[in-house]
Image (cartoon, grey):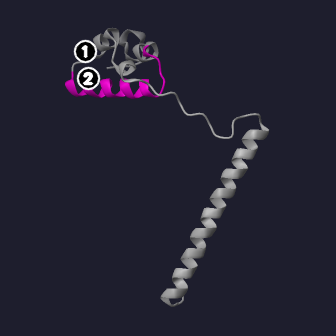
Amino acid sequence: MRWPWVSRLAFDLAVERYEKAEERAQKLQDHVTRVTRKELGMTEEPRTAPRVTETELEIPDEVEMLIREYDSEQTRVRLRAEARASRMHGTPWSEIQKVLDPEAGVVTA
């Protein structure tokens, strides 16, 4: 598609109007979302996930023993990182331990 040639001032004004319209549309969408949540008996803003403390990210001995059973050092490093990331998202260590246990049949090495 070929666009017509316009002056720089006209282009800047069009961009400015577009940005203002986008900003207003976003504010209206946020307002509608808050009103809808309120009507459904929820809080206006979604609750944030509870923060996991640094001590809760320490890998328990049982999980560490399962990770050490893997042969590759790269695999062990990746599993430790994934276990911590899963814990940060609220997955309990017991669930992580079940996934890592090769005898449970969930993960095949």
The image quarter containing residue 39 is top right
Counting from the top left corner in percent of width and height, residue 71 is at 21, 19
Counting from the top left corner in percent of width and height, residue 51 is at 47, 28
The image quarter containing residue 55 is top left
Say few, some or many: other residues with alpha carbon within 10 Å of mark 1 (under 14 / 14 to 19 / 20 or more). some
Amino acid at circle 2: Arg
Q: The C terminus is located in which quarter?
A: top left
Counting from the top left corner in percent of width and height, residue 72 is at 21, 23
| Labels 1 and 2 touching (C-beta < 8 A) | yes
Q: Which residues are magenta?
A: 72-93
Element type at mark 1: helix
At x 72%, y 40%, the residue is: 37
Q: Is residue 66 left or right of residue 46?
A: left
Q: Foreground residue, 99 or 109?
A: 99
Q: Is residue 100 left or right of residue 1?
A: left
Whether residue 1 is visible here, answered yes or no, is no
At x 23%, y 28%, the residue is: 74
Q: How many marks?
A: 2
Q: Examine the rendered structure and indicate whether residue 50 appears above or below residue 106.
A: below
Magenta span contains residue 86: yes
Q: Which residue is mark 2?
A: 76
Q: Foreground residue, 92 or 20?
A: 20
> Which label sits on residue 68?
1
Q: Foreground residue, 11 or 67?
A: 11
At x 70%, y 51%, the residue is: 31
Q: Is residue 93 left or right of residue 17?
A: left
Q: Examine the rendered structure and indicate whether residue 80 appears above or below residue 27.
A: above
Amino acid at circle 1: Arg
Element type at mark 2: helix
At x 57%, y 79%, the residue is: 14
Q: Main secondary structure of the magenta part?
A: helix
